[in-house]
Amino acid sequence: MARFAKTAAVSVAVLGLVGGLAACSGSSGGDAGSGTVTLDWSFWDQGTTNDSWKALADDVHKSDANLTVKMTMTPFADYFTKLQSQLAAGTTACIVSMQSLRLPAFKDALEPIGPLMEKAGFDASEWNEGALKALQVDGQQYAIPYGLSTMLLYYNKDMFKAAGVTEPTNDWTTADFEDAAKKVTAATGKPAFGQSFSDLHMFSMLLAYNGARPVTDEAKLDLTNAEMKQAFTWYTGLSTNQKVASVPASSSDVPWGEQQFVAGNVAMAVDGDWNISSNASDAKFNVGVVALPQGENGGGTYSANSGFGISKSCEHKEEAAKAIAVITGADAQVAQAEAGTHPARTAADDAFFKSLATTVDKKTPGYSEQAKAAMEAASAKSIPFISTASWDNTTKLIAREFILAYSGDESADSALQSVQQSAK
Amino acid sequence: MTVLVDKRASARPRKARRHSDGPAALGFLTPSAAGLTVFVLFPSVLAIATSLFHWPTYGEITFAGLDNYKTLFTGQSDFGAALLNTILFTVLIVPLNLVLTVSVAFWVATSRFRQLYRVLFFIPVVTPSVATAIIWKLLYQPDGVISWAAGLFGIQLPNLLGSSSTALGAVVVVILWNGFGYNMLIFSAAIDQLPEDVLAAAALDGAGPLRILFRMKLPLMTPAIFFASTVTLIQAFQIFNEPYVMTAGGPGTSTITVVMNVYQTAFQSGQLGEAAAPAMVLFVLILVVTLVQWTGQKKWVHYE
């Protein structure tokens, strides 16, 4: 009996030990031992430019032997869900990559970065103003940008040529767009334009149509205003009435249009200029790119960007700021520009277009010039995309409801109403 | 009195000879019990507690009492639709699964290549359900293989995953395909264990094959059927992978399930307390259904 009790006591002790170990939370953001500091940096998969980013992490160590940066990459679709669970568990990385769209939702988890960066030598005059502003909320800087992007219209040059339709220009109107779409659809037998549920991609087409915006300046969702109803009716009409658009196959196919474009199934799609190099090199056809077609009161296009912030739970904030200064430093931006990412530092612009010329112009002559013209035309009339604090929830609702409007099972108005009511 | 004296008299020699399995058993159970405690019991209790709080992923945690449960049935929550869909999924999948697997198990048992068939049917079970869901999604696409095949027969299929009337059915097909082999294996084992002599005697007595099937074989298999139906029911209530990958809950709310609602509330809306409440409701629902099944087994399960 005593032996049994003793064994039982040992078992309970083991259980308690295991339970205690499991309950222990891991280190938050990094650890320091004997003067060296290791920082965690969370980022989303960049595809072909992954290696250039990893090289920047190594550059931090080169600049300061006591500082090491460990980068973790997650597919973009899962990145913000993962960030949520890391925040809940207290295991957020020190250096957190953040997209301007998602900043309102996550700003409470980030440390205002301005004062920390100034200590590390930050000078706002070296930066594109719009790029910095997109990562501010209420005048506070929360992240340092590494790029600045606008939404553009990509088209399949080969399909246009085969259909005998003149290629798009930066002055295209909505009427020109519809006309070309009809002709290309008739010639190829497949819908010419790929619709999308991606927030930037879809809402930028609506903005370009008549200036409609889904979120007010006070960051409140407003999908039922008159311009939005008009614009969305036009957008869904592309598939339901005019039959020139390809509808996403399901609500889980969020980036439908842009993926169908690269696969060669649709002739036109909206995509960001972050893919201006990879789309052209990855596609098995010749790619062209212009600014979005504008309606009568068209509002131009949306700009958005991403950058690096420091989590509030980071235990080495000053070291993190130093690391970010290296990662977004002048040399780093030139290296990124050469690798195909449009830089946020004004000095690195030339390097970007030169590199684009070397990578793509052999395959598609004149691409880098067309790209430069398109980006300049787009930037001239672009506004930052403002999102709400519960934007992830809203995008989920958009994918679920809007498919019914794209396929004609529901009216455009009731789809907008439905999302507006359900979104918190 | 006598017993006490006896015990004391022979205490030492008896102890030396006594071989107790207690400590050994405890030793072997501890790792499993440790895992169960840490990964199942502790989180379950924590979830019950979490459902009583407003618990954002970062920020202040405040006591909410039963507020999270009250909001489940308001218009803004997906829970109502999710519960309805989950029940619909279950009502479709469990009977279809059982009928199909029992039938195919019997059919395969008559074949010479039964072991090969059993392996082939089991392969979808061991393949990750997310991977098969992605492949099926491609098959279901408007330009995909399924609509091409239907076109050969002159049938114009709608976008199966994009239309609210067909999306749930399309996902049910994939779930049946994924989970088919598991129950089939259970029933195959049960069929293999059917007593030959009893069945032969019945045949000699003039019982036809259908009579033998319904009056003898199936009743003899009821323990296996009970197990399979209970497990399949519990799994059906927790469907998440296939609808999430294939339709993300759309179109509209036609394929949201309770577990999907829990996941999205916790990790897309960042509200852990509001996510724990539907999880608890599902827990109670599964518990009640399983209890009903458990008490019902006296009526229809024949253990030999």
Image: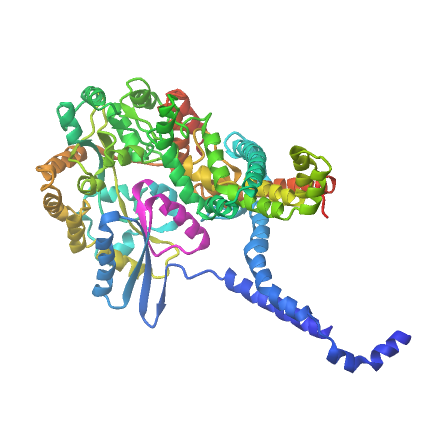
Q: How many marks?
A: 0
The image quarter in which residue A103 lies: top left
Is residue A390 visible in the rendered image? The answer is: no
Q: Is residue A17 above or below residue A402?
A: below
Q: Is residue B41 left or right of residue A72?
A: right
Query: Closest to the observer: A357 or B4?
Result: B4
Question: Which residue, as the protein is rendered here, is positioned at the far front?
Answer: B204
Q: Is residue A421 visible?
A: yes
Q: Magenta segment, which residues?
A: A74-101
Give x and y (percent) for residue A380.
16, 33
Q: Nearer the viewer, residue A223 or B22?
A: B22
Report the front residue among B58 and A201: A201
Q: Position of residue A291 (x, y in %)?
A: 18, 31
- Position of the C terminus of chain A by quadrant: top left
Point 56% across, 34% down: residue = B96
Residue A93 magenta: yes
Residue that sits furthest to the top in the current view: A241
Q: Is residue A43 left or right of residue B6?
A: left
* Residue A377 location (% of width, % of height): 15, 32
Q: Residue A111 placed where, x, y %? A: 35, 52
Q: Nearer the viewer, residue A170 or B119?
A: B119
| Colouring mode (rainbow / by chain / secondary structure / one colour) | rainbow
Q: Measuring 30% from the left and 30% from the top, which residue is drawn there?
A: A203
Q: Quadrant of residue B143?
A: top left
